[in-house]
Image (cartoon, helix red, strand yellow):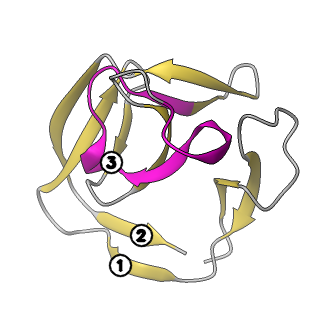
Amino acid sequence: IDDLVLTISRTRTAIDARFPSIAYERVYSFAHYDPNESKVEYLRLLPSGLELSANHYVYRIATSSGSETGKGGGQFVPAREIKVGDDLLIYDDMTAESKQKMVTGIQNVHRRGALAPL
């Protein structure tokens, strides 16, 4: 609680109108909190290396077939719907910018702990 997490939102003004804005928001609760839960399955999206649950929402800009996915060029979808070739909105810590990146691979990985901050 009270930690900051990086979030994206369409309700704020974005620098680039194609993408939602990015901001840190304070964690006020957890929908799920079990840091000791063993062998939790996550998806690793490549090349970003982002690891998340299949139910976690990500911002997909375009599908692997090349079609735009929603108004303004993208929409939030559960990670389980992501396919190789989809374009995602990825935040680059080095440049502090949002970038469009194509998913080149998806791996199943197991980690200890399951957290869903709100």
Q: Disc 1 and disc 3: Cα gap in Å?
A: 17 Å
Nearer-the-camera pick, 39 or 7: 7
Q: Secondary structure at mark 1?
A: strand
Answer whether labels 2 and 1 touch (C-beta < 8 Å).
Answer: yes
Q: Residue at x 83, y 57 (%)?
A: 12
Q: Disc 2 and disc 1: Cα gap in Å?
A: 5 Å
Q: Quadrant of the rendered structure where residue 114 is?
A: bottom left
Nearer-the-camera pick, 7 or 1: 7
Tell me which label, 2 or 3, sits earlier in the chain.
3
Q: Which residue is mark 2?
A: 116
Residue 79's disc is: 3
Residue 32's disc is: 1
- In the picture, measured across the screen, residue 12 lies left or right of residue 93, that is right
The verdict on residue 74 being magenta is: yes
The verdict on residue 49 being magenta is: no
Nearer-the-camera pick, 62 or 12: 62
Residue type marked 1: His
Residue 89 appears at what percent x and percent y?
57, 33
Point out the stretch of residues depicted in magenta.
Answer: 68-89
Tell me which label, 2 or 1, sits earlier in the chain.
1
Callout 3 environment at 10 Å: few (<14), some (14 to 19), or many (20+)?
many
Please say if 34 is above or below 95.
Answer: below
Residue type marked 3: Ala
